[in-house]
Image (tube, rainbow, N blue to C red):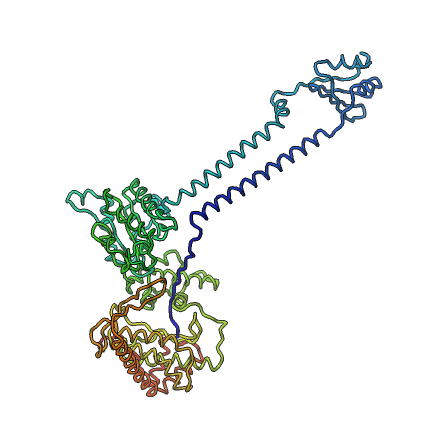
Amino acid sequence: MPNNKKYNHLKAPKKGGKKGLKQSLGKSLWQNILVTLLIFFIIIGAYSLIAENGTKQEKIAISQLALQINERLVSEIVVKGEELEILYTDSTEQKSKKESGTALTDTLVNYGVSLEELKDVKIEIKNPSGFLFWLGNLAPFLIPLLFIVFFIWFLSRQVKGAGMQAFSFGQSKARMIDPKDKTQRITFNDVAGAKEAKQELLEIVDFLKNPKKFLDIGARIPKGIVLMGAPGTGKTLLARAVAGEASVPFFSISGSEFVEMFVGVGASRVRDLFKLAKKTAPAIIFVDEIDAVGRVRGVGAGGGNDEREQTLNQILVEMDGFEPNEKVIVMAATNRPDVLDPALLRPGRFDRRVVIDLPDRKDREDILKIHARKKPLGEDVNFTTIAERTPGFSGADLYSLVNEAAILAAREERKQVSQFDFVRSIEKVMLGPERKSHILSKREKEITAYHEAGHALVASVLPYADPVHKISIISRGRAAGYTLKLPFEDRRMQSKKEFIDDIAVSLGGYLAEKMIFDDLTTGASNDLQVLTALARNMVTKYGMSEKMGPVALEGDNGRTMFGIGIADKKHSEKVSAEIDAEVTYIIDHAHRSAEHILKTHRKALDSIAKKLVEVETIERDEFEKLLLLNSITPKKKQDIEHSE
């Protein structure tokens, strides 16, 4: 059943260019101008409305005020410059205006008001304050003027910002981690496993802390260290740990961040990055995925262009050019060291290569303990067992495993993470989540049960196949069912006998379907792809064919031209036919072996399949009991050692 992991990193192409940049900046500027003018007109309209409302009240004539005083209707008059506020005996108010430069009493007397009548009216004179007076008079002129000044300042700021944005492409986008920031500091205590890699990097830490010890004896520490390893093995984590141990600034940037559509931008960013690092030296520059800019130059394949090559040239010059670069160490990470330019790996540049392998069983146990530090664990948690069941897991996979276990516990409203959560999360990381909504029909369930039983039975009988730990017909990811096989111990090499047995195990499900139902389904498609690729690699890469002999006929990776894979073919058509015949022979040999096992142990096959249909999942202990009931001795660790 399918058990493939595919990681697709898709990046949208950058559009536009210099012309598009100018258009976007101009469009943004005009939008800001229009918005500002709109705000200006709104403010002017609001001010006019307020001013109009303020002057809407009608004023009475001074002659009318004189008549009202004579009729004893006025109780008080407040004089504010030329403005008059009149309070009547019935508590109503009115406004009027007198002549400038003339006293109010003289004006009223001239209009026929006797002094006797004026004595009964309270007259109060209030001179307006200087600030309010001038503000009221100058406001109609000051507000538009201030707005125009603000408008000019706003436009100049927008133009300046657009210009700065256009010229900031050449500046480095590196992220700096300050050694004083305790929240982001990582040391070697936070990195489990990778003992040899840490030993190599300890020299770098010692140099950054005490360079005099090396310089006095005439030794020069390597300027560049390239960390090589599979994805998720902890390359970036180790680089940060070096900076944390040495307490120096850590500049981190991805290789793809150097390259832009504009020619020369990448080289400018490289110069700016090294300039920043030199100012804060001793420091570490870390370039992740350096193969994005460090590929072999001049081949015209693999996405090569003048901009990328200029960026690489600048990196080469900065690392070992005319200017000395003491106390600035460049670290890089890649999982494709085979595509790097030779000039990048020569002595004086990245002259120290640190290989980081997948963790072994003890390392996986230590990594699990680090990731589980802040998680409440149940008493039944046994990291040794979990480490044994996760061969081939990287550090990132183990982090995901621990996180998934915590999520499962939280989903079920539990306060502690148990062993059962970790066991379930192993399968989730390997195969994907359970597809509980994908309910198989009765016939599909039987076909899947016999398919998985065929895999498990062949694996249990063949001496060089890995022992079965679990069988399930519960759908996970793209798989309708799965058989979990795990070795007793980690292996760095595999033998020809192990490969042949693996091919036979892959054929077990296919043959079980054909033998029981006299028909075939699409469920074995992935098994057939895997075993065919394995048989071809045995012939063309590993020299495991008696007929072809110890010859490597195909490389590890084909070349790529315009995004299309090109086979790295270096042999004739006759040899190709012989390779195909030898691959067919290996598969036929495994086919006969698996078919013989299924026919010989037909009773065991039926027993395992029926149990699967009944319970859907069979663990290792229960599976071994079924084998014993059918006269098949389960594998033990010593049996594997003796057979080897």
Residue 609 visible? The answer is yes
Residue 182 visible? The answer is no
Residue 404's x, y, as percent? 42, 62
Q: Residue at x 48, y 37 (%)?
A: 157
- Image position of 597 with respect to 379: above or below: below
**Of the pair 313 and 292, the residue shown nearer to us:** 313
Residue 63's image quarter?
Answer: top right
Residue 463's x, y, as percent? 27, 79
Residue 297's x, y, as percent? 28, 55
Q: Quadrant of the C terminus?
A: bottom left
**Of the pair 471 and 330, the residue shown nearer to us:** 330
Q: Residue at x 75, y 24 (%)?
A: 95
- Image position of 259 with respect to 616: above or below: above
Left or right, residue 339 beside residue 414: left
Residue 390's x, y, as percent? 33, 67
Q: Residue at x 15, y 45 (%)?
A: 218
Which residue is outermost to the left? 217
**Of the pair 212 and 496, the residue shown nearer to us:** 496
Residue 630's image quarter?
Answer: bottom left
Q: Quadrant of the N terminus?
A: bottom left
Exactly how many numbered labels are in the figure? 0
**Of the pair 570 and 221, the residue shown nearer to us:** 570
Which residue is outermost to the right? 71
Residue 612's image quarter?
Answer: bottom left
